Image (tube, rainbow, N blue to C red):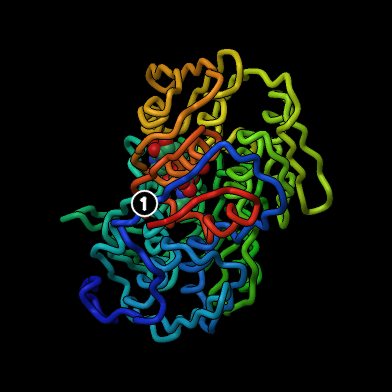
Amino acid sequence: MSLSVRTEGQSQPPDLRFQENAEERLHIFGGRRLRGEIRVSGAKNSAIALMPAALLGDSPSVIENVPRITDVSRYITLLHLLGAEIACCENTVTIDPQRVTSAALDGEPVRAMRASYYLMGALLGRFHEAHVGMPGGCDLGPRPIDQHLKGFEALGAEVEVQGGLVHLQARELHGARIYLDVVSVGATINLLLAAARADGQTIIENAAREPEVVDLANFLCAMGAQIRGAGTDTIRIQGVPHLHGASYSCIPDRIEAGTYMIAAAATKGRLRISGVIPTHLDPLIAKLREIGVRVEEHGDALLVDGSYPGQHAVDIKTQPYPGFPTDLQQPMTAYLAIVPGTSIITDTIYESRFRHVNELKRMGADIRVQGRTAVVEGVPQLTGAAVTVSDLRAGAALLVAGLEAEGETIVDGLIYLDRGYEHFEEKLAAVGAQLLRK
Ligand code: EPU
């Protein structure tokens, strides 16, 4: 096994990188009611957990319904740098992990995204060691990884953080009982990855219940893992010595779906959002109904009709799943900015996830932020302005704001939106939005 830390300076898979242009801006000509149907893509936060999981197999895995977004493209680069052979065709990614010989990776692609830390669990599970740069990702306040490291230690790894790298080394990886002090999606996923091939039983208590955790557990089970309880707060993993490759399809992206549902309501439009798992959206459906938006379930589609009068303010508190998702807090703030009355929005997950608010204020919103709470006084209308995106879901918020506002909104910082929303301009243009990237 090679122990030199690989970086992005080495060869790149030339045909696998999706376009990224930091100079481009999105011009939104708002005030049009969205009407029609939007089909939801595969879930970003599942895809970027399933792809490293494929490293644990001793034969190729085929993952379908993978969104073509830059976070996926970055993950492909990471796996390629480790030596995996990768083929992409439309939304299907085939990963052959057999030639991966290195457990060490650092560099810009590692630091550019949060989910690069899943390489720690996957490489530790496969090689009993991992040397991976500290992750980056959206700036939402402090995002420690202490629970991940505590769990790796419990599984038998020695942990050392030095020079911006996390070094994990285990003579043997064994099952353990791990109680997470905070409900963490990332720590739950990382520990599932590390424990799937460990000796004996691992029990993760106070585990995250997010659908993306369940999706990963299902994929690992398709690879031969023995996991019970995913989707509850206690997950039991009986380690197995080997996993094989599997064919699997990512669940639909509930946050993408939710963003378009909010856009339908915010433009007083009527959208059919298809290809979703409606129960994943229960907290949003409940809040939209409370505001006065009609939401109907039709099998795997949701019909959202925001054209009825009498909408009124609501309070929202983000919580781990099945509570209201923090990832929809930002687009929801943009919508509530034009809903009559005072809405109080509290983000209990992140310390600093209100950087979109200053931009909304440029567009005429009346919002005060106090700590983790935003007090939103609904105004009759927002007006277009030049705004800048600070993180992925702030981008979703400004997209919603631009669509509901009168006049032209110019959105700078599209690289964030491209990280998480597949073909969003095409999807929105097809339901009547007027937007132009240039
Ligand atoms: N936390 C700790 N210690 C840890 C881990 C987490 O204190 O070791 C804290 C975090 O600081 C945060 C809270 O626990 O306050 C929850 O963090 P979590 O670990 O659940 O978040 P994450 O795994 O880093 C994922 C998604 C986020 C999403 C959150 C919450 C991925 C790659 N990211 O992040 O998605 O907001 O779960 O649902 O899956 C996004 O898609 O825009 C996004 C930010």
Secondary structure type for disc 1: strand
Q: Residue at x 65, y 51 (%)?
A: 431
Q: How many numbered marks are there? A: 1
Q: From what the image shows, is residue 13 above or below residue 176?
A: below
**Quarter-wise, where is residue 156 in the image?**
bottom left
Horizontal and vertical percent for residue 147?
40, 44
Mark 1 = which residue?
25
- The answer to whether residue 110 is above or below residue 323 is below
User: Is residue 123 visible to the viewer in this orientation of the structure?
Assistant: no
Q: Quadrant of the C terminus?
A: bottom left
Between 160 and 116, the one nearer to me in the picture:
116
Q: Is residue 207 above or below residue 293?
A: below
Q: Can you say which quadrant of the picture contains the N terminus?
A: bottom left
Task: State whether label 1 is within 8 Å of ligand 1.
Answer: no
Image-based side of 373 in relation to 40, left or right: left
* Residue at point 53%, 55% (across, down): 424
Identify the residue at image location x=58%, y=78%: 62
- Relative to 232, is 49 above or below? below
Image coordinates of residue 361 in percent, x first then y, are: 39, 25
Percent x, y of residue 385: 38, 34
From the viewer's side, name the closer residue of 161 and 335. Answer: 335
